[in-house]
Image: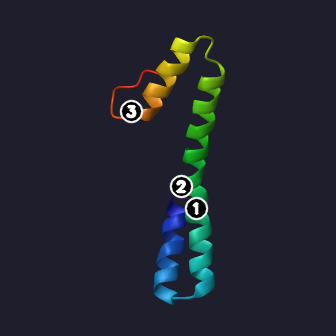
Amino acid sequence: MNHRYKLFRSAVNTKDETAWANYKKVRDEITGHPRRAKSRFVCEKINSAKSTAEYWKVLSKVANPKRKQDY
């Protein structure tokens, strides 16, 4: 996160296109990693569901994230 912030400050101060490109690349990597991890986790939970009821339980937890989750 600190590296991303430093790249952002550099891009804002210099207004250089390569600095903005570097910042955007790092930003996308940082935000994409948790998304991919969550996606893999959900896929593993769905694939490991042994019954239809368990499958639907996992889907309802994923579809309604505001409810308390107990993975």
Give the percent coordinates (x, y) of residue 29. Answer: 61, 58
Horizontal side, residue 40 vs residue 68: left or right:
right
Which numbered disc, 1 or 3, marks the residue that appears first in the sequence? Answer: 1
Q: Which element carries disc 1, helix, strand or loop?
A: helix
Instruction: Identify which residue, 51 or 14, lies in the foreground.
Output: 51
Residue, disc 1: 28
Which picture quadrant has residue 64?
top left
Q: CA distance from mark 1 to mark 2?
A: 5 Å
Give the percent coordinates (x, y) of residue 7. Answer: 54, 73
Disc number placed over residue 10 in the picture, else none: none
Q: Residues within 10 Å of mark 1 (few under 14, many from 20)?
A: few
Badge nearest the viewer, 1 or 3: 3
Kindly check if marks 1 and 2 are in contact, taking CB atoms under 8 A apart as contact.
yes
Q: CA distance from mark 2 to mark 3?
A: 21 Å
Instruction: Identify which residue, 64 or 19, lies in the foreground.
Output: 64
Amino acid on which disc 1 is placed: Asp
Disc number placed over residue 64 in the picture, else none: 3
Amino acid on which disc 3 is placed: Asn
Query: Is 61 located above or below residue 27 in the figure?
Result: above
